[in-house]
Amino acid sequence: MNKALCWWISRLAFSLGFALALLSGSGCQSSPSSDATPTPAPSIPQLIHQPGSPEMMELKRGEVPGVIMVEVREVDLPAVLETSGQVSFDDRRVSSIVSRVQGRIEQTRVSLWDNVRRGEQIIALYSPDFMTAEAEYLQAKATDKLSVPSANTSGGNLADALVTAARHKLELLGMEEADIAAITMPSPTVWMRAPISGTVVDNKAVRGAAVNPGDVLYSLGTLDHVWITADVYEDDLSRIKAGQQLDAVTTAFPDEVFRGVITRISPNVDPVTHTLQIRCEVANPGFKLKPQMLARVKITTQPGKALVVPQDALVFETDNYYAFVESESNRVERRKVSIASWGQQRYARVVSGLKAGDRVVTGETLQVNALWHEAHGESS
């Protein structure tokens, strides 16, 4: 009985030991496969320097998963050129009242934003210069009346010349012809009049303040016609010319179209934005357009061409955009690119830096840019 029991106990121990051995062996064999093999980090790419050529970086296909090369393409521009601009006064319709004497402001009759008529009395200036010049004028007139020219003398001509010179002096001091003709007694106070009809757009006159020659007291402007200064990309320069018609729309009056014409094209191009300015004269019924107001300008012109590139091909860094251009097999060049907005989503218009047919990196541009910095020993 004891022998049978011992035999069964030994068989059970053997079976348990064998099972434990199998489980132990299976666990040892599966443990290596359960640990994920770490993906090796991309190696730092090599920079290529060739005399007379831009710096390039090796970028083998498949080294950065997700990188796609696409071509910069040329597309048709619509026959309507759209741009943004800003309203300003037509400087030919702006005038200033400037003090031409040293003196004091005695009285003012208008304030900022008041409408005035040409010839209206605006400001009274006190100055001894007025009194002196008026006295000289009255004396010259009295001398002219007393002089009796003879056949052998030029006394009459001299007296006339003195009157003319005295009147001219008063005009230089800012007096109008009608005010000069009305002088009967010398006075140190003279009313300065509005040189044009318009709106007071700047007021620096304060009663009792001292003034000096050259001080601007008032600025007047008219708003029946205004200027809109707009920016145009240099690529569109061939499509615009003076005399072209345009429509302008503002956010203040979105349902009203203001019509005008291009009068001037700037001779200078901004080297940073590659834009130049155009000046448009626009009719302003009801004086609705105000200086500094923003406007959207549409110019009817000839169709043109433009370069476009996917937005994800661009990297923005330190106020500039860059693209990675395939220059040779497995090599890319980092280029600075100037862009403009484009109506099609996910695309940008190329102003400079790329040309049609260039193949650029898209998809993982930020990672490629990080590799570029690592190749230079920098942190992206």
Image: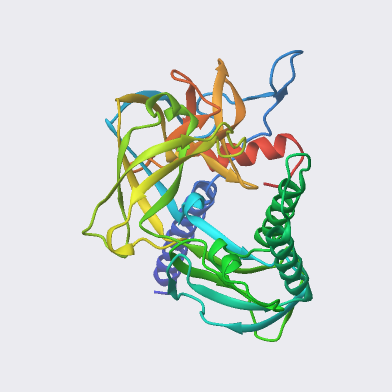
Q: Is residue 255 visible?
A: yes
Percent x, y of residue 195: 52, 62
Q: Note whether 183 is above or below 296 in the view shown.
A: below
Left or right, 373 with reference to 3: right
Q: Note whether 71 is above or below 159 in the view shown.
A: above
Percent x, y of residue 182: 57, 71
Q: Is residue 41 visible?
A: no
Nearer to us in this view, 20 or 55: 55
Q: Note whether 187 is above or below 6 in the view shown.
A: below
**Colour approach in the figure:** rainbow
Left or right, 266 with reference to 347: right
Nearer to us in this view, 122 or 16: 122
Percent x, y of residue 320: 60, 42
Percent x, y of residue 27: 50, 54
Q: How many marks?
A: 0
Residue lying farthest to the left in this orientation: 255
The N terminus: image quadrant:
bottom left
Residue at (66, 34) in percent of width and height: 43
Residue lying farthest to the front in this orientation: 151
Dividing the picture into quadrants, the one containing residue 344 is: top left
Q: Note whether 111 is above or below 83 in the view shown.
A: below
Nearer to us in this view, 3 or 106: 106
Residue at (53, 29) in percent of width and height: 352
Nearer to us in this view, 357 or 82: 82
Residue at (32, 44) in percent of width and height: 260
Residue at (44, 19) in percent of width and height: 356
Left or right, 223 with reference to 34: left
